[in-house]
Amino acid sequence: MATFTEPSPRGFLYLGLEVVAPGPGPFVRRSAERDTEVAGLTELAEALEKVPEVAAVHVYRAVMIPPIRGGPRFDLAVLVETTSPEDISAVRSTSHYRDIGATFAMPARNVERIGRTDASRPGTMLFNHFTAPDPDRAVAVWQTLTGWYTDKTGIDNSTALVPLEEAPYALVNYARLPDGPGRFLFQQLLRPSFHRFVRARLAAHDMKAMPVLCEPVRP
């Protein structure tokens, strides 16, 4: 198990948008329509950061979505950090937030984290969506998997978000990867211990992990 640090006191709004269908393969190709949407989201993010309860707003473009049955197909994502979980409702009441027009919205708090996930630098970001029959158990299972990822893939950060209201995911964690999306996935799939330990442990608890790998367009 990895070494955990104190959870962030901030609140989080994780938003997913489906602008252009990513296609059947894992890689998400660039799209003029999506680029136009990104420009609009960037303006909204700048306006939203002026709201007193908002600490930061990050906009992401998906670069790889593994074709997992039932997985999210968000080609754009927005992560809003509020000054506290209690301030989320005030942010959701603003016109800037409503104008984002998210397909999916999950208000959340950080329940556990490894290091600090720095969203201010370029690089590949992983958003991993977990389904589970028991949300509380999902966090415990995720904790037991963290050591494998820090040891085998070199990840030194991860922020686990749990929803504050009913959501299709028991847990969404996001992390900055040390390498690109392809290398990260191959580091998992080509290691026998990934299948023997990580996948087996998820299956034993009837959990599924569904990643979306992104690049920041507005850190």
Image (spheres, rainbow, N blue to C red):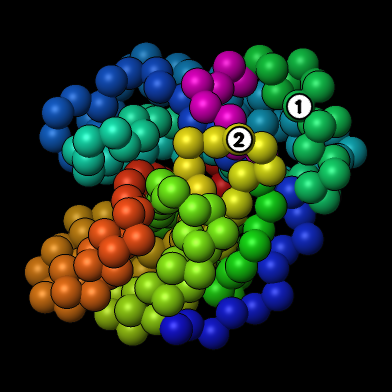
Q: Amino acid at mark 2?
A: Glu
Rendered location of residue 194, percent (x, y): 20, 71
Question: Residue 105 vs residue 51: left or right?
Answer: left
Q: What residue do we see at 65% from left, 78% from top?
A: 5
Q: Which mark is residue 208?
A: none
Report the span colored magenta.
Answer: 100-107
**Which residue position is annotated with label 1?**
92
Quadrant of the image occupied by residue 52: top right
Rendered location of residue 180, percent (x, y): 28, 59
Q: Amino acid at mark 1?
A: Arg
Residue 146 on the magenta span: no
Residue 174 seen: yes
Q: What residue do we see at 44% from left, 66% from top?
A: 142
Question: Residue 171 vs residue 106: left or right?
Answer: left
Rendered location of residue 141, percent (x, y): 43, 68
The answer to whether residue 187 is above or below residue 39 is below
Residue 38 seen: no
**Which residue position is annotated with label 2?**
166
Instruction: State which mark lies toward you, 1 or 2.
Output: 2
Question: Residue 25 vs residue 137: left or right?
Answer: left
Quadrant of the image occupied by residue 207: bottom left
- Marks 1 and 2, how far apart at CA: 16 Å
The answer to whether residue 141 is above or below residue 21 is below
**Element assignment for label 2:** loop
* Towards the viewer: 131 or 7: 131
* Towards the viewer: 215 or 23: 23
Residue at the far right in the pictured view: 52
CB under 8 Å between discs 1 and 2: no
Q: Quadrant of the N terminus?
A: bottom left
**Element assignment for label 1:** helix
